[in-house]
Image (cartoon, rainbow, N blue to C red):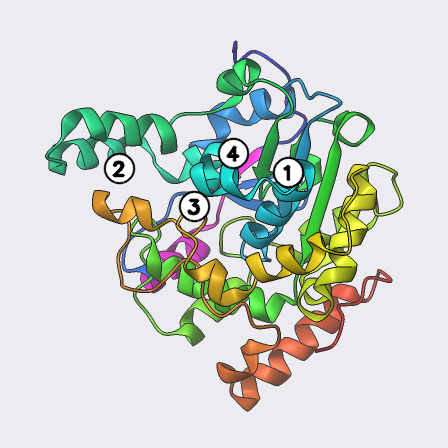
Amino acid sequence: MENNKQFPYKFEELDLEEKADIARSYGVPKDFISVGPKKYKLLRPYCDEAANIYNMPVRSDDTFVMTYQRSGTTWAQELIWLIANDLDFAKAKALTLTERYTFIELFMFFNKKWQEDFMNNVEDKEKGLVVIDKVGKPVTDKLLLRPSPRFIKTHLPLSLLPPSLLDTSKVVYVARDPRDVAVSSFHHSRLFKVLDFPNPFKEFWNLFIRDLFTLTPIFEHVKEAWEMRHHPNMLFLFYEELSKDLPATIQKIADFLGKEVSPVQIPALCDHLSIENFKNNQSVNFEDVREFGLLATEEKFIRTGKAGGWRDYFDEEMTQQAEQWIADNLRDTDLRYPSM
């Protein structure tokens, strides 16, 4: 794609104090830039592709799964794909989730320096090039060639995606208690070498609530989708809904996608999506990338799936801080997270 298309937002550098705090917490600098009036934090490679993403053609049979990261994305992807594909468990097992979904902004985590270092250290250069192509290259051109129906994953907020998206394609947005998101993002940042957060959770939390982590501010991200929840092509879900009543959520998604699920199929789908089965599902748990040295620890991509698990990580000071943070950010909206 030609990168001469218009993009409506400005890129700004973080201030020196913010950069210093990020570098101190990670132990190395992280090349974040701030995008637009809401100051979403993205990694610098995004800048070169922002206009292509914003202007990419979308189709009427596209299904987008959109979340702020670690909000139940993988669970929702598997659920939505299976409902859309008539519960084809065999095909879901045969194809990894990364083969079934295109992840729009994945490339921004793997900059040129990372790619060079990776190729210098990988023994099988041919396999290395395959990995680079999968994770390090922008996908807008590849999406043009992908046959319909396409399934697309993104953690980008609505404002950074094509303006015609909701009038054209189906979008399922999943939101989760931001305290649980912070805990899950912390573990995610310890799992993947490209993120590689070395310090305790409290240090991570202090970055997260100051909007100094990827795609923060989380509340702006969620509120953009919440404001469009009544659009006929938007299904807004809470992770806590999936956890509390998965059969009802399955039916809600099926209705949204115009698919039929029988009373016999729903229990089978619930069993497939149970946390224990999900942890052992090789097509969704990203263990296939461990052989390439992309994972930093023995932690797992699929963890506990627990709603309200943040309580195991927060001391009294952090709990009060989080309550005030949530109250301040929900003051101008009727968005309320379900209690668990």
Alpha carbon of mark 3 to alpha carbon of mark 1: how far?
36 Å
Mark 4 or 2: the one toward you:
4
SS state under label 2:
helix
Q: Residue at x 49, y 70 (%)?
A: 304
Q: For the residue carrying disc 3, how many other residues have a C-alpha within 10 Å: few (<14), some (14-19), or many (20+)?
A: some
Nearest the camera: 284 or 91? 91
Q: Position of residue 293 (x, y in %)?
A: 22, 47
Q: Earlier in the sequence, mark 4 or mark 3?
A: 4
Alpha carbon of mark 4 to alpha carbon of mark 2: how far?
25 Å
Q: Which residue is mark 4?
A: 100
Q: Which mark is residue 114?
A: 2
Location of residue 168 by image quarter: top right
Q: Position of residue 176 (x, y in %)?
A: 65, 62
Q: Residue at x 39, y 50 (%)?
A: 282
4 and 3 marks in contact (CB < 8 Å)? no
SS state under label 4:
helix
Q: Which residue is mark 3?
A: 283
> Quick check: 292 above or below 332?
above
Q: Is residue 53 left or right of residue 136?
A: right
Q: Is residue 251 left or right of residue 278?
A: right
Amino acid bearing label 3: Ser
Specify the segment rendered in magenta: 11-25
Q: Which mark is residue 36?
A: 1
Q: Earlier in the sequence, mark 3 or mark 1?
A: 1
